[in-house]
Image (cartoon, helix red, strand yellow):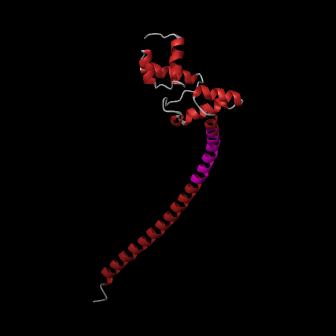
């Protein structure tokens, strides 16, 4: 397995970012390395905290929610100038980061609303199940009583005979 210099590795990873936005396949072809190697380099860069979106070459619309959240976290402590520099280096607009930050803030609220709604639905379903079980027990008791009466009437008819004749 060949060992690549760190400079070559960094140059290849830089091609995955803006302004190039090349796909891992294109970088692999240009650098003459396997595509698995490029994916490994991208994974290592992510583990170091660098923001590398999954979908390269497709613009920021194709970024995963994980990548967007990572960008929001990276820029959380930055001032406006640092955010602008960060955005230029990643091919983003500061407005996109603001929208993503708002979405991240709203996600927690939506999750709690979803949990409350699901809890209410579960409560309603449990009440419906209890109601149906109660109705089933009542009907089973009525059926058992009817079966017992039918059996008794047959035995009575067998013992005393049919009076209707």
User: Vertically, is 163 above or below 12?
Assistant: below
Residue 15: image location, x then y, percent:
51, 21
Q: From this viewpoint, which residue is outermost toward the right?
A: 79
Question: Along the line of sight, which residue is nearer the eye, 154 or 141?
Answer: 141
Residue 18: image location, x then y, percent:
54, 25
Is there any visible trace of residue 5 in the rendered image? yes
At x 56%, y 59%, the residue is: 124
User: Vertically, is 113 above or below 93?
Assistant: below
- Magenta portion: prevailing SS class: helix
At x 46%, y 24%, the residue is: 24
At x 51%, y 60%, the residue is: 129
Q: Which residues are magenta?
A: 99-118
Image check: 17 left or right of 101?
left
Q: Residue 100 in magenta?
A: yes
Q: Residue 111 in magenta?
A: yes
User: Vertically, is 61 above or below 41?
Assistant: below
Q: Picture quarter containing residue 143? A: bottom left
Image check: 156 left or right of 49?
left
At x 68%, y 32%, the residue is: 76
Residue 105: image location, x then y, percent:
65, 41
Question: Along the line of sight, which residue is nearer the eye, 115 or 163?
Answer: 115
Is there any visible trace of residue 77 in the rendered image? no
Total numbered badges shown on the rendered structure: 0
């Amino acid at each position: 397995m060949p060992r690549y210099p760190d400079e070559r590795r960094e140059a290849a990873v830089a091609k995955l970012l803006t302004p190039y936005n090349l796909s891992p396949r294109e970088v692999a072809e240009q650098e003459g390395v396997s595509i698995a190697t490029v994916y490994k380099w991208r994974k290592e860069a992510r583990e170091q905290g660098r923001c590398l979106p999954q979908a390269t070459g497709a613009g920021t619309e194709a970024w995963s929610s994980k990548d967007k959240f990572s960008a929001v976290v990276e820029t959380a402590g930055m001032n406006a100038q640092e955010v602008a520099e960060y955005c230029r280096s990643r091919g983003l607009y500061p407005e996109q980061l603001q929208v993503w930050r708002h979405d991240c803030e709203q996600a927690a609220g939506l999750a709690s609303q979803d949990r409350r709604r699901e809890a209410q639905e579960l409560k309603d379903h449990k009440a419906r199940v209890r109601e149906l079980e109660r109705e089933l027990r009542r009907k089973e008791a009525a059926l058992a009583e009817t079966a017992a009466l039918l059996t008794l009437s047959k035995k009575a008819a067998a013992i005393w005979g049919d009076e209707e004749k």
